[in-house]
Amino acid sequence: MTAIAEVILTGTGYPRPHPERAGPGALVRCGGYTLQFDAGRATSMRLAALGVSCRDLDAVFLSHHHSDHLVGLADIALSRWVALDRDAPDTPLRVVAPAGPAARFATTLLDPFVDDIAVRKSQTGRSTSPEVRCLTFEPGRRPSRVWENGTLGVYAVRVHHEPVEPAVAYRVETPRGNVVISGDTRPCRELAEFANGAQVLVHEVVRGDKVGATASRGILDYHADARELGSLLAGVEIGTLLLTHLIPAPDSPAAERALVDEVRQGGYGGEIVVGRDLTRVRLA
């Protein structure tokens, strides 16, 4: 069992493709378990950069059904199967998702690849096909446990990303401390209560004054403006606030500092890290 206890950003981007930022995702490793939260574009490549095989994932957790959080999931499912030796034991990819569109996506994930799977089986003589097993849960405004194994437990709570429903945040409870991943949400009381006491909070953020006037009407309706996020988290006990899903993506250290300043202006005084792909925070 590994002594590693950490959270790593596997992607800090958003729907618009960026050459240095994969789609949204975070990896949590602790006690020998490896958990992936969301799977945006190029997630498998970021995992490869970490030396993590898609077969190493014990579960993938989906926060909601926006495409930028899901588009890398098929790649993970197929890659773990394609890389398998013909005679090696196969195991399904376990996906945990709130009941509704995200769960439906996971259960039908491999349907478009039936012809590819058939020809690969024919060529290699393999008897197994890639498999996704989806564990669904009904999300509520109060936290509920959705997964546990050994000393780890994962809890979910419904957050506010309307009109995208349902959308959830996750909390991973470990012997080394708790990690909370916000998914996509506007600032909301449920998230602040859920994250109180966490060693790490991975939270999306938007610089509202830097997005276009037209775009802001849509984006800020259901994402977290930096100053509003700082106001929400003022007084909340968090070890490290790790910012991700950055809109717009900072293109310089000065832009990163400006983002931090805006969160501070809202009232949050704790440690802030502006995420880049593969940013890593160790749990104490």
Image: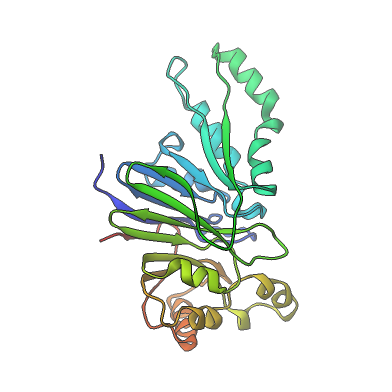
The number of numbered badges drawn on the structure is 0
Q: Quadrant of residue 237?
A: bottom left
> 146 or 270: which is nearer to us?
146
Q: Is residue 103 left or right of residue 258?
A: right
Q: Residue at x 44, y 33 (%)?
A: 55
Q: Is residue 196 left or right of residue 102?
A: left
According to the image, what is the colour scheme of the structure?
rainbow
In the rendered image, the vertical position of residue 145 relative to residue 128, given as above or below? below
Q: Is residue 195 visible?
A: yes
- The quarter of the picture where residue 13 lies is bottom right
* Percent position of residue 201, x then y: 43, 66
From this viewpoint, which residue is outermost toward the top?
Answer: 125
Q: Residue at x 52, y 78 (%)?
A: 229
x%, y% of residue 14?
A: 60, 61
The residue closer to the viewer here, 196 or 208, is: 196
Image quarter for residue 212? bottom right
Query: Looking at the image, which residue is at 63% across and 40% down?
Result: 106
Q: Which sits in the foreground, 136 or 211?
A: 136
Which residue appears at 72% of the width and 74% of the height?
215
With respect to residue 221, does 264 lie above or below? below
Q: Is 1 located above or below residue 234 in the figure? A: above
Q: Residue furthest right?
A: 214
Residue 16 x %, y %: 64, 61
Question: Residue 101: horizontal and vertical position, in percent?
Answer: 70, 48
Which image quadrant: the C terminus?
A: bottom left
Quadrant of the frame with the N terminus: top left
**Residue 242 appears in the picture as rendered:** no
